[in-house]
Image: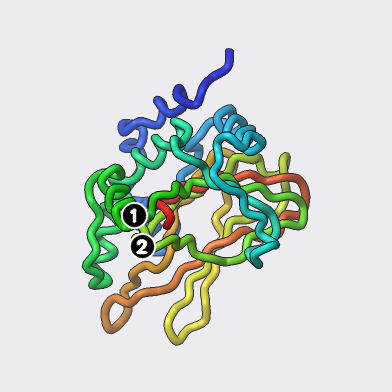
Amino acid sequence: MKIHHAEWAAQIRNDQRDQLDWHRLGEDLDRYGAAHMPGLLPADACHALTALYGDDRHFRSQVVMARHGFGSGEYKYFAYPLPALIQQLRTCFYPPLAAIANRWNQAMNIDVRYPATHAQYLERCHAAGQGRPTPLLLQYAAGDYNCLHQDLYGEHVFPLQMAILLSQPGKDFTGGEFVLTEQRPRMQSRAEVVPLKQGDAVVFAVHHRPVQGARGVYRVMMRHGVSRLRSGHRHTLGIIFHDAA
């Protein structure tokens, strides 16, 4: 029997989210700028999300990276209404991430605070003219890669986002590691590679994050990307919590 996206969405409920070790996730985000969530989605959900890529009815636009100097590969932004599973991922994971984001902004002396629910935050985005949905599916083939970048789409930027690997490393593709870099003031940049399996998620800093130094807290600039695929095909779901102008 075919399982629909709404049925997977029902599995991504608050009780499942609350079973995650948020203390560990928060510590990893503070220390490394990224946190690993193993096995967030089952393989059949990954396959169904990957299959959406060929159906343009679900998307508002397509980007071929080479045309813009972004790398090599392509991605598509989902249109509203979002598939139920993607909508639920945004709704469910926003509140605990907003608590971390508010703590970060307080540490960095940034006045912005994030409301309790994702619906409230989207109201803020839409009132500022940021009304286009930003969740996306990315597709890579052998030789493709994604340059280091930040997903900034307007005045309002939620400082954390998620990526979920939909393909199986070693079977569907080789290479294609998720990479973060941290640009520290007056220091050399630091790289972080997050090894992911099919269905794993990584939460990471979009723009900058606080770091405790000898003279207090300072900001480090973060960028993320994907290393070159050696073979096969790789699909990833990106969950960005702010909408685009």
Real-space Cα separation, disc 2 to disc 1, in angstroms: 6 Å
Q: Residue at x 31, y 37 (%)?
A: 18
- Kindly tell me whether residue 96 is visible in this rendering: no
Residue appearing at x 31%, y 33% in the figure: 14
- Please determine whether, in this image, residue 38 is positioned above or below residue 124: above
- Mark 2: which secondary structure? helix
Classify mark 1: helix, strand or loop. Answer: helix
Asked if residue 151 can be seen in this view, the reply is yes
Rendered location of residue 121, percent (x, y)? 29, 49
Quarter of image, res 157: bottom left
Q: Amino acid at mark 1?
A: Gly
- In the displayed structure, 205 sits above or below 214; it is above
Decide: marks 2, 1 in contact (CB < 8 A)? yes
Look at label 2 and name its amino acid: Asp
| Left or right: 232 in relation to 27 | right
Q: Which mark is residue 13?
A: none
Q: Quadrant of the C terminus?
A: bottom left
Could you classify mark 2 by the number of other residues whose Cα lies within 10 Å: few (under 14), some (14-19), or many (20 or more)? Answer: some
Image spot of residue 216 (x, y percent): 26, 79
Which residue does the numbered mark 1 point to in the structure image? 26
Residue 94 picture location, percent across and down = 33, 46
- Residue 155 position by quadrant: bottom left
The residue positioned 29% from the left and 42% from the top of the image is 119
Label 1 packing within 10 angstroms: few (<14), some (14-19), many (20+) = some
Residue 188 vs residue 128, the one in the foreground = 128
Name the residue beneath numbered marker 2.
30
Image-based side of 117 in relation to 180, left or right: left
Display coloring: rainbow
- Tell whether 146 sits left or right of 163: right
Quarter of the rendering occupied by the N terminus? top right
Q: Is residue 102 left or right of residue 166?
A: left
